[in-house]
């Protein structure tokens, strides 16, 4: 697998800063500097450079919804579409707040794969029946409700990816 | 009471009935009018009909979208009879077809 490089090339220090930020984006420049044995001003400059070039897209918060008392279910929809309408379907799906991720995939048929959340099965079905199935170009939908999450991580940053290596 | 022509009209695609086999699994068949609905009942798998009948989806759509409380009541009666598989498919088709014919001719028809 090849990483699609941005306009600037990153050195080892940049990658290490990114790894540190992925672990904890709230740490200060000084904390990162101490961790990597470099000056905090160096960390600041590297981070600013990566922000300006869009290497760092944003800082976000991973919320423990269960901990916040929210009950919800997650499902993965596989939508078989008319190839001519596929982009439109993906675009419209992406606008729904409860649709978290949308992908296009080409197997035997053109598929859209989307991750969706809902309060319960009834709300999930209602959303799919009234908002997804009627979209022009939707031919069939298969939905799998996720019962257990075994792993969820961001993309592992680093100069070399060892995709199949066990962590 | 809604007029026969209004009940028999073709509705917008957002208001059409979409057939599922289970929660979230759309089988690719839909009906935008009562007449189309009767045709689709013959075509779709009876499992899909069971799924919708026992959730109350058919009577809800017929009543709230098409505006036919009379047919909604007849479908509810079918639900209470606990029909399944081919029996359900046959009886549901006959019930909807009969209602279509009544609305077209303006006369109640005998069973």
Image (cartoon, grey):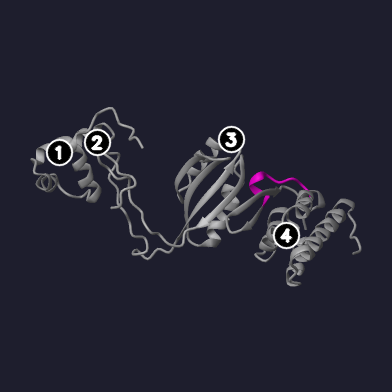
| Displayed quadrant of residue B82 | bottom right
Residue marked by disc 3: A83
Against A102, residue A70 (above or below) is: below
Element under label 2? helix
Q: Is residue A20 left or right of residue B50?
A: left
Q: Nearer the viewer, mark 4 or mark 2?
A: 4
The magenta region covers B8-18
Note whether A95 is above or below B67 in the view shown. Answer: above
Identify residue for label 1: A44
Q: In the rendering, at what x and y percent does residue A5 appear? A: 30, 31
User: Which quarter of the figure has residue B48?
Assistant: bottom right
Q: In this picture, is A52 found above or below B95?
A: above
Instruction: Provide the residue designation for mark 2.
Output: A51
Quote the CA–CA distance across marks 3 and 2.
36 Å
| The magenta stretch spans residue B15 | yes
Per the model, the C-alpha gap separating discs 4 and 2 is: 56 Å
Q: Nearer the viewer, mark 3 or mark 2?
A: 3
Q: Please tell me which of labels 3 and 2 falls first in the chain.
A: 2
**Can you tell which of label 3 and label 1 is closer to the viewer?**
3
């Amino acid at each position: 697998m090849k990483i699609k490089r941005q306009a600037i090339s990153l050195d080892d220090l940049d990658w290490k800063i990114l790894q540190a930020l992925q672990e904890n984006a709230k740490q200060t420049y000084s904390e990162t500097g101490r961790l990597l044995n470099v000056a905090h001003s160096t960390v600041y400059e590297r981070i600013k450079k990566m922000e300006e070039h869009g290497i760092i897209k944003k800082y976000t918060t991973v919320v423990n919804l269960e901990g916040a008392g929210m009950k919800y279910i997650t499902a993965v929809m596989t939508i078989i579409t008319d190839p001519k309408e596929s982009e439109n379907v993906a675009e419209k799906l992406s606008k729904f707040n409860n649709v978290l991720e949308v992908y296009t995939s080409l197997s035997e048929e053109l598929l859209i794969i989307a991750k969706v959340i809902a309060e319960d099965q009834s709300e999930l079905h209602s959303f799919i029946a009234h908002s997804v199935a009627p979209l022009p170009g939707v031919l069939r939908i298969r939905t799998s409700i996720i019962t257990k999450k075994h792993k969820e991580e961001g993309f592992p940053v680093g100069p070399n990816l060892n995709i199949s290596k066990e962590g | 009471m809604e007029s026969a022509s209004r009940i028999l009209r073709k509705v917008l695609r957002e208001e059409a009935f979409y057939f599922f086999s289970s929660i979230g699994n759309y089988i690719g068949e839909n009906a935008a009018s009562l007449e189309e609905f009767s045709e689709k009942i013959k075509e779709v798998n009876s499992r899909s009909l069971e799924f919708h009948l026992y959730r109350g989806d058919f009577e809800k759509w017929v009543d709230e979208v098409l505006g036919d409380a009379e047919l909604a009541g007849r479908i509810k009666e079918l639900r209470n009879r606990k029909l399944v598989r081919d029996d359900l498919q046959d009886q549901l088709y006959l019930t909807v077809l009969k209602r279509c014919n009544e609305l077209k001719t303006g006369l109640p028809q005998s069973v």
